[in-house]
Image (tube, helix red, strand yellow):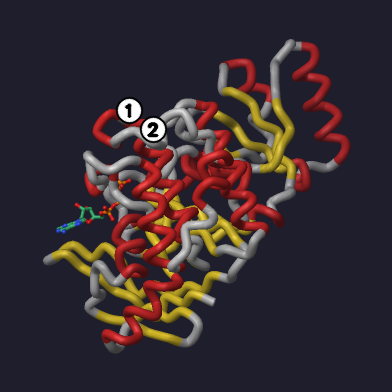
Amino acid sequence: MLKIKNVSLAFGEHQVLDNLNLEFKQGQIIGLVAPNGTGKSTLINVILHNLIPQRGEVEYDSLTYSSNKNEVKLHKSICAFPDQNDLFPYMTGRDHLKLYADLWHNSSSSVNEIISQLQMASYIDKKTATYSLGMKQRLCFAMVVAADTSVMLLDEIMNGLDPQNVSLISDVLIELKRKGKLLIMASHLLQNLQLYADRVLFLKSGHVIQDINLQDNKELYLKLQDSNKVESIIKNIKHLKLANGLNLISLAELDNLKKEKLMQDLALNLIPYKVEPISLEDLFEIHYGE
Ligand SMILES: Nc1ncnc2c1ncn2[C@@H]1O[C@H](COP(=O)(O)OP(=O)(O)OP(=O)(O)O)[C@@H](O)[C@H]1O
């Protein structure tokens, strides 16, 4: 269990994390969602001990960063997605994977399997100076997989990847979760995150403003894009209008008579609609839309 206990961190006057208390279980993918500059990377850096909070502490398996010895032990369990700028240009991708596997496990036996799983065979033996941004991004992810730690901190791993690579990495994330890893990831690709995250935290002004378990998120909403016609049809029905013009109507809160009348009106006026649970994109609009 990873615990964030009473963590507060400010840069000067700017309070980025304000008395955060969170607990994360193994075998889950946790999404961190917020607009740019809200504190997602700051939280990841606190978990890594790259940033030391003014108050509070991080605890993993009953250990805190209270001594150098503990720090070494914790860093055996926690690995973060490396920055592309930290790759060595004259080393090959394979050298990087071996380095990570050796550093964490003293064994690089898993490297070939990771190369084939992430379809990197055609370029893995070339120097990283020759890699495109997307190839470097995939290598950085593969390095975390090679480290094979119980906790993986993944800040914007999908940045700059084409849809095929996003899908390839998503499959590996699901497999890592099945193996019992705890994955904490900051991401702006909300539709993608929705596919595999178990729990998503929305951050604002140093706090978690919503902590949603996606497995429990089953309540159905009727979703309608705004127009004059839609406005007049739903004017007497309780609805939530989002900043992007989408109207959400909770079906659980509509009685059968109103539901029937509404469906008839939509059909008569040929108005398209969707019925589905609230999405991460909807929640982003609710929390941050203007
Ligand atoms: N070293 C620093 N010194 C001063 N301010 C900082 C420092 N690092 C981050 N900040 C500020 O802290 C706030 C949170 O930054 P952080 O990088 O955690 O945001 P983020 O949610 O990860 O954003 P993004 O989506 O852009 O990656 C920002 O306002 C940023 O300017």
Q: Position of residue 72 (x, y in %)?
A: 33, 79
Name the quadrant containing residue 228: top right
Q: Is residue 14 left or right of residue 276?
A: left
153, 232: nearer the viewer: 153
Q: Label 1 to label 2, Cα distance in Å?
A: 5 Å
Which residue is the site of mark 1?
A: 132
Asked whether residue 134 appears in the rendered view, the answer is yes
Labels 1 & 2 near each other (Cβ < 8 A): yes
Q: Position of residue 253 (x, y in %)?
A: 75, 47
Asked whether residue 282 appears in the rendered view, the answer is no
Q: Which mark is residue 57?
A: none
49, 259: nearer the viewer: 49
Name the residue: 31% across, 69% down: 46
Under mark 1, the amino acid is Ser
Name the quadrant containing residue 92: top left
Which residue is the site of mark 2?
A: 135
Q: Position of residue 150 (x, y in %)?
A: 52, 68
Q: Is residue 133 left or right of residue 157?
A: left
Q: Is residue 21 left or right of residue 214?
A: left
